Amino acid sequence: MQTSTDSVAIDSSQPDVVPNRIHSSRVSSPMQVVMIAMIMLAMLFGYGRWRTGSFHMVWPWLMGRQLVFSPIQIELGSLSPNQMIEKQIRVNNVSSTQLSILGSQKSCGCIGLDEFPIEIDGGESQDLRIRIVAGKTAGEFEHHVKFFTNSSSGNVEVVTVAGIVD
């Protein structure tokens, strides 16, 4: 039995033994998962950029949309009474098959559009002309155009046209 006054001899000729960790790394496991996820996301967006031709088309493509209308909101600003404005709407087909814009429904007779149907090949884009005639009376206005398509991701796209008649 040892007492507090007894001393224990320690052999100092043996080096300290340090356990070797099998899974030692400079970066923690959660950080590795985050880094792998970021690399995969970057690859996905890179593929989407290559597939659609534009970074702003990647998100609609990831959401499954096949025809992407841009802009979907046309702000005309201040107009004179009965003033006619012509704008362009770009329609991008981000699918690999030909799709069609079959027709439209306008909320006002003051809006003129191109003739339908309009065929857009896969990976291509088409500009649509939209002509808007401002009202006779002063005030704000907002009109909508529904475009009907044969896209399997959704067959109706809505474009809003707004402005102010001085």
Image: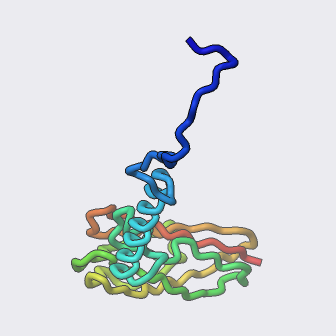
Q: Quadrant of residue 154?
A: bottom left
Q: Residue furthest top?
A: 1
Which residue is drawn at the image coordinates 54% and 86% (left, top)?
87
Residue 23 lies, with reference to residue 65, above or below; the image says: above
The residue located at (56%, 35%) in the rendering is: 10
The reply to whether residue 113 is in sight is no
Closer to us: 94 or 40:
40
* Quarter in which the N terminus is drawn: top right
The residue closer to the viewer here, 82 or 140, is: 140
Front residue of 81/40: it is 40
Q: Quadrant location of residue 12? A: top right
> Which colour scheme appears in the figure?
rainbow
Relative to 113, say whether 8 is above or below: above
Q: Can you say whether 77 is above or below 61 in the image?
A: below
The x and y percentages for residue 125 are: 37, 86
In this orientation, does residue 101 appear?
Answer: yes
User: Is 91 left, or right, of 139 in this rendering?
Assistant: left
Name the image quarter holding residue 99.
Answer: bottom left
Q: Residue furthest left?
A: 97
Residue at screen point 33% across, 76% down: 94
**In the rendered view of the protein, which quadrant contains the C terminus?**
bottom right
Instruction: Provide residue 85's location: percent of width, then percent of height.
Output: 60, 87
Q: Position of residue 146 (x, y in %)?
A: 43, 67
Q: Residue at x 59, y 15 (%)?
A: 2
Q: Residue 153, how many percent across, how many down?
A: 31, 62
Return the residue nearer the eye: 70 or 139: 70
